[in-house]
Image (cartoon, rainbow, N blue to C red):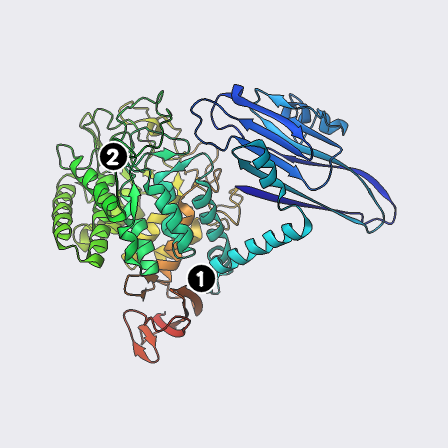
Amino acid sequence: MRILYRIEAKNVSEKKKDVTLIFENEPRPALSWHDAYGEAHANGKSIVYSHVGYRVASDLGYLALSSSDIPSGFETSYARLFGVYGSPEMPKGGLKRGALSCQGDEFEGHYVGAFSYSLSLAPGEKKDIRLGLATAESEDAAIDASSSALSEDAFQAEWDAIIAKERSSHSRFQVHSSDEILNAQVNTWLKRQISLGKNWGRLYGKGFRDVLQDITSFASLDPKAAKKQLTHALAHQYEDGNPIRMFEPNFHYPYQDGAPWIPMAVLSLVNETGDASYLQEEIPYLKGVSKDSYSLVDAYVEEPYESSTSGTVLDHVLRGMDYLTTTLGEHGLVLWGGGDWNDSINAAGLEGKGESVWLSLATLKALKETIALLNIVHDEDNIARMEEKAKALEANILKHGLVDGHFIYGINDEGKVLGGKERIFLNPQSFAVLSMIGNPETRERAMDQIEERCSCEYRYMQCAPSMDKGDPHIGRASYFQKGLVENGSVYLHGVAFKMVADALLKRPEALYADYRKIRFDNPANPQNGMEPYAFSNMMMGPESKYRKGEAPMSWITGTAGWVYRALTEYMLGVRPTFEGLVVDPCLPKDFGRASMTRVFRNRTYEIAYIPSKDKEGTYVEGQRVDILPLGKEGDHIEVTVYYPSK
């Protein structure tokens, strides 16, 4: 891993200027919580940080920050740079004095990487300084990796390569409409946020279900990168079929919702590429079975990535489905364990009795995606087996999961219903539609209750009303303040699920309104704090006492990927199937004309959307089609889509 920086200083005055320029970075070299493993020192034009210790999660124990120019000073300690009680805004240490200590450090929880440069610039003169940050298995290798691209030519070549790669990825899907914010988000910013999530694993670790959702969204943009990340993630699935909760570092708390995301990610990649051979590629399993400890004390214990068995990608899919459909409670619903998507309901199934209706719905959806994969390879025996499992699970959900026309969240270890008459949860209603459970009337009624009971001016609360009393048989969500995170916030990831459900129910006005209200520019929620180039994890709900509507947690969220798919695959309706692209838009009647470019299997489709009062459907060369023709590689295919207008 390498990060490059470029600083350009220019004297715009008419006099010679002597200045001190200080570059400051805050690396996080610690690979464990043991600060005693860590040390930092200068080595030539580099600062090197080491964190090498017993059972550390990674072999990349060295990190180097290197400069293209010889610095006049350096600093490694935040306290020395800014002062013990200082900050970048109000420095009290070496930064205030303009002199760095030129000292190394150890046993530090907050390192910095700072260089000072003494510059003398004539009028109009510029100075260009380049820096690199890289990790490696040794000090010399880290310095080489961080400094190898710091010459002018090498830096520019790497920059050009990054730009070319980004353009190649971004050009695969471009939309042009009268909604300029939608254009900017779909064409650039959502892709960027998805890519960072896929590559970095949300910074604090690679959550299995998080990475798989990002991969699903990124498969259309860079299938090669998506395949690499998916293969890496699947190797963190135990032999019993349940994936580890999080890897790099390992987190073993027994959440149950890893496997439902596997068929979705695999299907998205196979549909995008048309290459079913990936289903036969061998990937190892983690040795043993998923950890059954419910203690947070040992949940982070590191284990070697040993493997005694492997299986094909399709085996990984099937083993995950078998795990979920045999891990059932007395009502025939999937056991809750230590949590599901709602990882703050983390104590409802600790005794091995609680059952999650949401997880059962997600499993039903995953079973149907598994059947779609099996149809591609014509595996009739497993198709029949999965269909039988889906039928039984659906019957149990409909029998035990419905209360007053909406789906409950689950039944905890005590037999208490969560999300019954007194409270409704958003996600089970959306996943009732995503899983296509029951009949249309059942799904419509459940979604209608969301509109009636969860809606606010910046969209839908995760649960309504918020829980107002802590319950050790529910978990931390019940202890959160009202309107915060999973306890009644407008949790945007869940709103994105609901947008897809709106599309499946053919509710275009609702879908577009959902999207407009969770954007940064919602006039009913001004100054919410959300950057225009990133989606937040949540907005504090209307029951928040002091900060309702505020969006404090941007970037670290699966919202970006699901909003991207909701807009591109469902609102604009361009979805890959194994046979080819399907165009099934769900556009509001006043959306107007729009166009998009979609690159698919080395063909370029130019799609025009035209509102019409008397014509509907997708046309190629004047002929109505259900699936866009593939043609030959390199072809440009013109497509016209008519959708209902006012």
Q: Position of residue 608 (x, y in %)?
A: 41, 71
Q: Which mark is residue 172?
A: 1
Q: Quadrant of residue 63?
A: top right
Answer left or right for 146 relative to 337. right
Q: Amino acid at mark 1?
A: Arg
- Secondary structure beneath label 2: loop
Whether residue 456 is visible = no
Q: Residue at x 81, y 50 (%)?
A: 125
Whether residue 418 is visible = yes
Q: Quadrant of the C terminus?
A: bottom left
Q: Position of residue 86 (x, y in %)?
A: 66, 25
> Which residue is nearer to you in this view: 601 or 44?
44
Answer left or right for 452 relative to 381. right
> Which residue is nearer to you in this view: 594 or 443?
594
> Which residue is nearer to you in this view: 335 or 630?
630
* Above or below 619: residue 100: above
Answer left or right for 269 relative to 446. right
Nearer-N-terminus badge (2/1):
1
Q: Amino acid at mark 2?
A: Glu
Q: Label 2: which residue? A: 422
Q: Residue at x 29, y 69 (%)?
A: 627
**Residue that protrudes farthest toward the bottom in the picture:** 622
- Secondary structure beneath label 1: loop
Q: Position of residue 428 (x, y in %)?
A: 26, 43
